């Protein structure tokens, strides 16, 4: 990523902030999550969500104090639960990068537990079409996180409703961009050789780099895999049937002549995976007519895929609209594919869903 970028500072802060937050989530998994099978009020996911959000907002507040922030969590629960609050504070105050210069960029450690609570509550922006707004998902992929599978720490910057910077920390994806997705990618992926930071700036391309515990590692440009034969493409879809219509996706796969089974994995790691050519197509099909996707679940991944040579729309062929608040209220579903075949994939989606154009 060129240092002359119009968003060079934002990119650097976002990458380091996500990297530091990812260190905390990995600590939570190894120290507290093993053996956990559900999400309750004191679960490891709750601890990781609050802790990662506090660290990211602290970094944003230090460098861009006037910017608004849309984030998933608020601190009311922590003010009522001293044990949970103290557990999170112990993790937050002890999590830092192993590089003094990198840590200085982020503004150093949070002062005290009250400051942590105030920072968490700064994620209450309503979003919208004006100004600079950051969207944070501190742990995207709850069940993937708990099973040692795929999850992502997600951060995107929108300016006047347009995503300009996107960063995804994916601790359990292989570092090697050439690694194709496999059926076991959804669980037990916490061994060595894993941990990727995906980044993009609008009109400047997308990159991947190995996650570290200190300064940023060297970036490598990424791009989607050219597809000459759709029958050989790899589908990515959500693990949970409640997140995407699996039966419809199977019908779309058959219509396109795809013979390989889809790869199921949690989180925006799907966006990163297709952006670097590990997979090819990501579908998230509407399950409930009233459901609205959250902007923090898509902002970073949408930009990274588009900057890697892909196209991302909803099932009606409309670009994802991040300008209308905390949700994608003007969109239904997601269709992401290499730009050259996106139209073909979209037609198959609309045929199966019986969408008339």
Image (tube, rainbow, N blue to C red):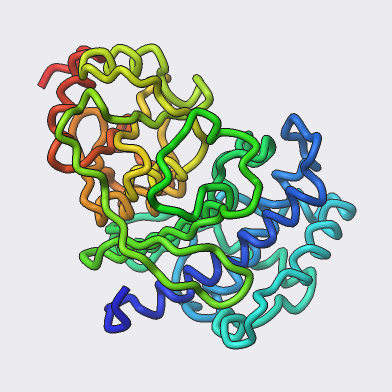
Q: Nearer the viewer, residue 182 or 256?
A: 182
Q: Is residue 279 above or below residue 196?
A: above
Lateral position of residue 180 relative to residue 75, left or right: left
Instruction: Give the residue displayed 27% in from the left and 53% down from the top.
Output: 223
Residue 70 visible in the displayed image:
no
Instruction: Give the residue displayed 28% in from the left and 46% down from the top.
Output: 321
Q: Quadrant of the N terminus?
A: bottom left
Lateral position of residue 251 relative to residue 146, left or right: left
Lateral position of residue 211 relative to residue 3, left or right: right
| Residue 65 on image: x %, y % | 50, 78
Q: Nearer the viewer, residue 108 or 126?
A: 108
| Residue 264 on image: x %, y % | 48, 28
Q: Nearer the viewer, residue 198 or 259?
A: 259
Q: Image quadrant of residue 7?
A: bottom left
Q: Image quadrant of residue 120?
A: bottom right
| Residue 17 on image: x %, y % | 55, 69
Instruction: Give the residue displayed 25% in from the left and 38% down from the top.
Output: 337
Instruction: Give the residue displayed 49% in from the left and 62% down from the top.
Output: 69
Q: Quadrant of the C terminus?
A: top left
């Amino acid at each position: 990523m060129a240092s002359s970028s119009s968003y060079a500072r934002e990119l650097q802060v976002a990458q380091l902030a996500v990297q530091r937050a990812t260190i905390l989530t990995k600590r939570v998994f190894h120290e507290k999550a093993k053996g956990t099978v559900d999400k309750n009020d004191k679960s490891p996911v709750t601890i990781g969500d609050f802790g990662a959000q506090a660290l990211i907002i602290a970094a944003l507040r230090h460098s861009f104090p006037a910017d608004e922030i849309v984030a998933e969590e608020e601190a009311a629960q922590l003010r009522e639960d001293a044990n949970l609050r103290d557990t999170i504070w112990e993790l937050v105050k002890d999590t830092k990068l192993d590089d003094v210069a990198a840590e200085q960029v982020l503004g150093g450690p949070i002062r005290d537990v009250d400051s942590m609570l105030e920072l968490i509550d700064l994620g209450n922006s309503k979003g919208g079409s004006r100004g600079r707004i950051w969207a944070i998902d501190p742990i995207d992929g709850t069940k993937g996180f708990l099973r040692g599978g795929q999850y992502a720490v997600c951060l995107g910057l929108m300016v006047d409703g347009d995503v300009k910077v996107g960063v995804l920390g994916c601790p359990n994806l292989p570092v090697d961009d050439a690694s194709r997705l496999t059926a076991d990618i959804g669980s037990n992926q916490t061994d060595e050789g894993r941990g990727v930071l995906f980044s993009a700036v609008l009109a400047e391309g997308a990159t991947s780099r190995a996650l570290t515990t200190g300064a940023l590692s060297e970036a490598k440009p990424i791009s989607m895999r050219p597809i000459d034969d759709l029958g050989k493409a790899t589908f990515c879809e959500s693990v949970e049937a409640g997140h995407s219509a699996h039966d419809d996706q199977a019908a779309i796969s058959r219509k396109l002549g795809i013979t390989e089974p889809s790869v199921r994995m949690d989180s925006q790691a799907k966006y990163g995976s297709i952006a670097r050519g590990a997979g090819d197509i990501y579908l998230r099909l509407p399950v409930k007519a009233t459901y609205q996707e959250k902007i923090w679940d898509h902002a970073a991944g949408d930009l990274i895929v588009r900057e890697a040579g892909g196209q991302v729309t909803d099932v009606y062929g409309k670009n994802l609209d991040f300008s209308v608040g905390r949700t994608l209220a003007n969109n239904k579903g997601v269709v992401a594919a290499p730009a050259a075949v996106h139209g073909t994939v979209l037609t198959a989606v609309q045929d199966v869903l019986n969408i008339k154009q």
